Amino acid sequence: MEELQFKYSNSDFILRTPSWQNPSTKSKFDSVLMGRWDNAVTNGCFRYTLDDLQTKLIPGPMKYIAQLNLKRASDRRKPQEMLSLSQPFNPNKFNFTKINDKEILIELCPDSSIKNKDKGGAIVANDSITSNGCANPNTAATEEESEENGVLEGAVKRQKTTNSKHVVIINVSPLEYCNILLVPNIQDCLPQMFTQEGIQVALEMLLLSSRRSFRVCGNSLGAFASVNHLHFHAYHLNYELKIETVPTKLVHGPCHELLDWPARGFIFQLDEATNVQKLARCIYTVANHLHSNEIAHNIFLTRGAPLGSEADGLQGETVRAIIWPRKSCFGAKTDEVFNVAVCELAGHLPIYSREGYANLTEEWTIGHVNEVSLSEQSFDVLKEDIKKLTF
């Protein structure tokens, strides 16, 4: 059986990627991920293929990218009903410990964390796993350390509470090429509540790719998460998104707010003052505050321009980490054109009806997004709360 563990260290992270005009070569991670995802397609592991996926640019300054994906609307697993942001994990519902082994592509292993190797890298029961597939909370903790400096400092330094694994699996109902799910600490059976550890692994996975097309994102409960088991989406979209260059304004410390964007949100960046570990902590600090106050939210991680106003020139490259507080939406997903989850907030619009795809306009899209965005007054109150947080 193919070895699934992917061991990495700070030296594998790619801080500068070629421009859109100069396609990059594949990183080691890209080659492994794409190869295994392509094999999963060949082996019929998905509910449908992307052969009929249609893509178009919606005219207008927002540069929305719309994609017609009829099969995702009809063939995907029925989303779970969510009732609150604090809904506990339910082992009797579908979760990612129940998937077929053939859906598992990679186990992400930060350097020095290779231990208890299972035969073939499969996710199997061992002393740290209980009979229901979840981790034993009494498992001894370990610590991995990094000696790197600068923006990579602490990138693989973390305190693991169990031997639970960071697993990359296919999304059996894909949005786009290489649509995967990152499930941090899979056997811990955590609810869909973002953790600092999970956010850091998501950032590290982004940095393992040399492709600007690779994005990582997540939805909280009440923000169109479909499964109440901690996970992030990732996929390749071969189009630049406006959100990657939109200007920003400083709020407090490393936290900025988006300017000239339909949905109000906060944004952080990777730089010399904010390394990978600190960036994960910043995102988590805001996400935890939102969760504690029952405010649904979406997270989007991407390559993009450094933060600042248009007057600053926005030259160069950074990792942009955006978190949108938004109005909660509980119950079934029902919109026949698109629901406003993280992709849609970022400017990528998976569309589920031919009529909606044909008639979609920027004006209608902005109005639809505005419906879930916090009001200016609510966002201003939240900004004052953010200013009191310690990053």
Image (cartoon, grey):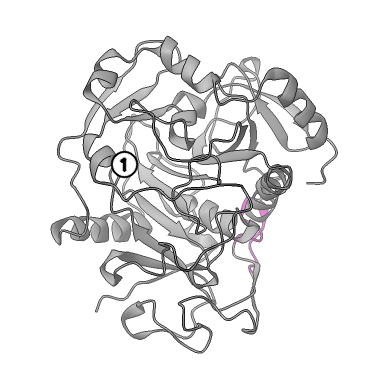
Look at the image and tell me whether residue 240 can be seen.
no
Q: How many numbered marks are there?
A: 1
Range covered by the magenta-colored residues: 146-155
In-front residue for pair 283/352: 352
In-front residue for pair 182/8: 182
154 drawn magenta: yes
Look at the image and tell me whether residue 379 can be seen.
yes
Whole-percent x, y for residue 105 in the image: 32, 64
Q: Residue furthest right?
A: 388
Please, what secondary structure does the residue beneath circle 1 have? Answer: loop
Whole-percent x, y for residue 72 in the image: 27, 41
181 drawn magenta: no
Whole-percent x, y for residue 155 in the image: 61, 59
The residue drawn where x is 74% and y is 27% is 250
Q: In the displayed structure, would residue 379 be above or below residue 82?
A: above
The residue drawn where x is 41% and y is 48% is 234
Overall secondary structure of the magenta stretch? loop
Neighbours of disc 1 within 10 Å: few (<14), some (14-19), many (20+): many
169 sits to left or right of 326: left
**Residue under numbered circle 1:** 175
Whole-percent x, y for residue 93 in the image: 44, 62
Q: Amino acid at mark 1?
A: Leu
Q: Quadrant of residue 70?
A: top left
